[in-house]
Image (cartoon, rainbow, N blue to C red):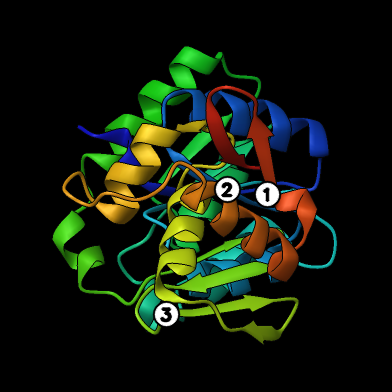
């Protein structure tokens, strides 16, 4: 099981939970996206087509059960798994979650290793081929990358990028916080058989920063670059 193939959307109104759970899932190399409320979660799910949504029950405005019901109304998300991650363990709460279309109910607090184990067990039920046939867009921090249409949006504004800049941004963006070495970037974006100058990556990074903002891409001196989530 290659964890990096799986997109997980984590939804909770508590920043500490998003940070803690997100950290432990990213450590296992899952692609992790976050939302702090149900409405944002639905919009993001439509964009990134996650394989699994970890959903808190107790949230303001739209609670987890309502969010799950709405998700299940979207045909494009019919194959996405939904697992409730909540401190509420009452039978009636679990029944409501399953009735809404949930696939699992995980009670907090839970040890990180146990959570990861439950997540892996759930994802074994996912048919990756189905998701490969679904147009995929990636979303993070107000930036949307649509790999099917070669479109980048930032805060609703379309940004035009040349092919290599688009591929470089997509690579960094695919694994937030992972430091991509210069060799990894050259191999992925330009190919091992292409000879380019040592400053090529730096020039492309500079142009990307000018277009999307300095805060998204960080230089790790002597190593490479990473996308900040």
The x, y position of residue 171, in whole percent, is 43, 52
Answer above or below: position of 213 versus 9: below
SS assignment at label 3: loop
Answer above or below: position of 57 versus 165: above
State how far apart marks 1 and 2 are (Cα).
Answer: 45 Å
Residue 217 image label: none
Q: Is 94 left or right of 183, judged from the image as shown? A: right
Residue 115 appears in the picture as rendered: yes
State how far apart marks 3 and 1 are (Cα).
Answer: 36 Å
- What residue did someone put label 1 on? 57
Q: Give the crowd class for mark 1: few <14, some 14-19, many >=20 residues within 10 Å.
A: many
Q: Is 192 left or right of 143, judged from the image as shown? A: left
Residue 202 image label: 2
Q: Farthest residue in the right direction?
A: 60
The x, y position of residue 207, in whole percent, is 64, 64
| Quadrant occupied by the N terminus | top left
Q: Give the number of the mark in front: 1 or 2.
A: 2
Residue under the image location 55 percent in, 45 percent down: 84
The x, y position of residue 90, in whole percent, is 63, 35
User: Which is nearer the eye, 130 or 57?
Assistant: 130
Residue 150 image label: 3
SS assignment at label 2: helix
Q: Give the crowd class for mark 2: few <14, some 14-19, many >=20 residues within 10 Å.
A: some
Residue under the image location 22 percent in, 52 percent down: 194
Residue under the image location 71 percent in, 66 percent down: 212
Q: Give the crowd class for mark 3: few <14, some 14-19, many >=20 residues within 10 Å.
A: some
Q: Give the number of the mark in front: 2 or 3.
A: 2
Residue under the image location 72 percent in, 60 percent down: 63
């Amino acid at each position: 099981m290659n964890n990096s193939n799986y997109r997980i959307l984590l939804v909770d109104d508590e920043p500490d939970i998003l940070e803690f759970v997100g950290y432990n899932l990213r450590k296992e190399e899952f692609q992790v996206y976050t939302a702090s409320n149900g409405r944002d979660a639905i919009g993001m799910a439509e964009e990134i087509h996650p394989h699994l949504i970890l959903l808190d029950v107790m949230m303001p405005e739209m609670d987890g059960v309502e969010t799950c019901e709405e998700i299940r109304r979207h045909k494009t998300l019919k194959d996405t798994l939904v697992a409730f991650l909540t401190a509420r363990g009452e039978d009636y709460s679990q029944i409501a979650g399953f009735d809404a279309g949930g696939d699992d109910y995980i009670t907090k607090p839970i040890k990180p290793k146990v959570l990861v184990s439950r997540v892996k067990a759930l994802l074994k039920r996912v048919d990756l081929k189905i998701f490969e046939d679904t147009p995929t867009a990636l979303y993070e921090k107000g930036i949307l990358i649509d790999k099917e249409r070669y479109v980048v949006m930032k805060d609703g504004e379309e940004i035009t990028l040349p092919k290599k800049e688009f591929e470089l941004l997509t690579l960094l963006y695919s694994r937030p916080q992972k430091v991509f070495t210069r060799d990894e970037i050259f191999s992925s974006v330009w190919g091992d058989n292409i000879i380019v100058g040592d400053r090529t990556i730096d020039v492309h990074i500079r142009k990307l920063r000018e277009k999307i903002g300095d805060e998204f891409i960080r230089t790790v001196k002597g190593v490479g670059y990473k996308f900040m989530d």
